[in-house]
Amino acid sequence: MRPASPPEKHADDLYRTGAGPGRFEFNQAVARVFDDMLERSVPLYRECLSATVGWAARYARPGSRVYDLGCSTGSLAAALANALPGGVHLVGVDNSPAMLEKAREKLQGRCTGWELIEADLAGNFRPTDASVVVLNYTLQFLPPHRRGELLKKIHQGMRDGGLLLLIEKITAENPEYDETLTALYHDYKRERGYTELEIARKRDALENVLIPMPPAENRTLIAGAGFRAVELFFRWNNFAGFVALK
């Protein structure tokens, strides 16, 4: 089979005008530019993707499932599909049909042993027989009171010794640093071509949609769901990555 051509990547221009698209949603307009948005808005995005693949490949077990929860346009899923050991079934889950359409374009014809599921992670979805579950930049979009419930369902659906990977935007443990963390993050976005208007409009659009927590609260949620050996494996100012074992 001849591999499909890579999906075209469009520049993130959603917030270039004062009107903007309003409250942030994972709709068709966002899906169109999401790959560029991630690479320009998420610090060390490519490095974190590579690190996630490395961790997942070491803990994935033949005959089990590896889940990418909140798989969006499938960039991580495509990388995982090419790196996981044989006999592993890859499952990408997202609640956005537009995102899943993009993910399907990336996976179709390039790899085997995968499926994409449209599901609300805050609803009835439950993983099964998982050796690895990835929650990158996903838990932060759930209402805080629903996060522990999802983590418990993930824990219940994993094999013993299974690995949870989670990367989140965070706030400071000491609130005195939050203003500086935000300023440094906005500097990062300016360096990647975003204007003051784009940064301000995006921040307004994400208000009460993306709700970060301090690292300690994330650790408490993860441990409270039953996971052990919670470890911080990545930190860049107001972004952090955690691993934990069942």
Image: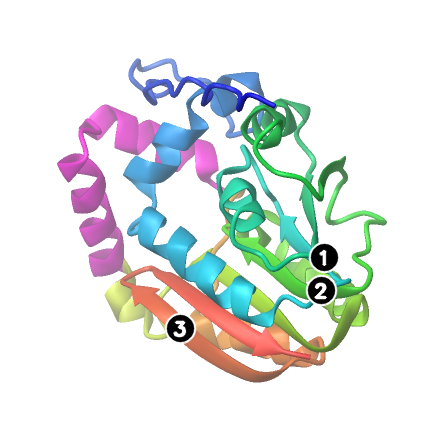
Q: Which numbered disc flags the more N-terminal residue, 1 or 2?
A: 2
Can the viewer see residue 129?
yes
Question: Is 136 inside the magenta-drawn segment?
Answer: no
Q: Which numbered disc flags the more N-terminal residue, 3 or 2?
A: 2
Instruction: Tell me the kind of residue under disc 3.
Output: Phe
Residue at image coords 51%, 27%? 23
Q: Is residue 129 left or right of residue 35?
A: right
| Residue that carries the numbered disc 1 in the rendered image | 87
Marks 1 and 3, Cα distance to the nearest angstrom? 27 Å
Give the magenta-colored segment's residue range.
Answer: 179-207
Question: Are dots 1 and 2 in contact, CB under 8 Å?
Answer: yes
Residue at image coords 56%, 44%? 77
Residue 84: x and y in percent read: 58, 56
Marks 3 and 2, Cα distance to the nearest angstrom? 25 Å
Q: Is residue 138 left or right of residue 241?
A: right
| Near-viewer residue (210 or 106) | 106
| Residue that carries the numbered disc 3 in the rendered image | 233
Whether 113 is drawn above or below 63: the answer is above
Q: Is residue 118 left or right of residue 207?
A: right
Of tags 1 and 3, the one toward the viewer is: 1
The disc label shown at residue 62, or none: 2
Residue 145: x and y in percent read: 68, 60
